[in-house]
Image (spheres, rainbow, N blue to C red):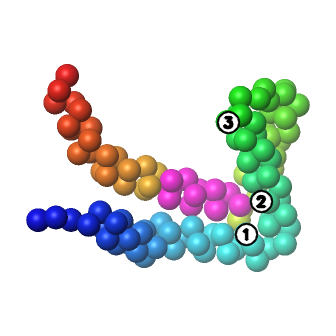
């Protein structure tokens, strides 16, 4: 029986959207963006985070000053209850996606592990 993997992927997407983890992430995101101060702080944090990731991916060195600024920003956002809640929800969703990825990759892992 042939299976259309794309249909299965879309079903998985639908399941993710209906999951408790996604609902919590969505609520926490809305809470942050409904609070102007939290929104600005979170967006500043994301900008710093994305800039550092880009530098890292391009093989550019990250200065000590940039590291210290990022650490200060992380400490600040973690003290804000709404942002801390959003970050916790992001972490949980990331763990779910990592677990799903393990399940999806299992056939390939099994295939390659049997020929060693």
Element type where label 3 sits in the image: helix
User: Which residue appears at 84% of the width and 35% of the height?
Assistant: 66
User: Which residue appears at 71% of the width and 34% of the height?
Assistant: 58
Residue 92: x, y in percent?
A: 50, 56
Query: What is the spatial separation of the Cα atoms under label 2 and label 3, in whole angstroms?
Result: 22 Å
* Residues at circles 2 and 1 in contact by the CB criterion of under 8 Å: yes
Element type where label 2 sits in the image: helix
The answer to which quarter of the image holds residue 80 is: bottom right
Local crowd at mark 1 within 10 Å, few (<14), some, or many (≥20)? Answer: many
The reply to whether the magenta stretch includes residue 90 is yes
Residue 12: x, y in percent?
A: 36, 67
Residue 111 lies, with reference to residue 24, above or below; the image says above
Quadrant of the frame with the C terminus: top left
Task: Tell which circle, 1 or 3, labels the residue nearer the N-terminal end.
Answer: 1
Q: Which residue is mark 2?
A: 42
Local crowd at mark 3 within 10 Å, few (<14), some, or many (≥20)? Answer: few
Residue 44: x, y in percent?
A: 83, 55
Q: Residue furthest left?
A: 1
Q: Which mark is residue 3?
A: none
């Amino acid at each position: 029986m042939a299976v259309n993997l794309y249909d299965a992927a879309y079903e998985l997407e639908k399941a993710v959207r209906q999951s408790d983890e996604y609902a919590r992430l969505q609520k926490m995101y809305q809470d942050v963006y409904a609070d102007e101060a939290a929104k600005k702080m979170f967006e500043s944090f994301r900008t710093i985070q994305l800039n550092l990731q880009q530098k890292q991916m391009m093989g550019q060195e990250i200065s000590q000053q940039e590291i210290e600024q990022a650490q200060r920003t992380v400490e600040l956002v973690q003290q804000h209850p709404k942002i801390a809640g959003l970050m916790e929800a992001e972490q949980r969703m990331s763990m779910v996606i990592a677990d799903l990825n393990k399940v999806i990759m299992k056939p390939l892992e099994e295939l390659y592990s049997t020929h060693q």
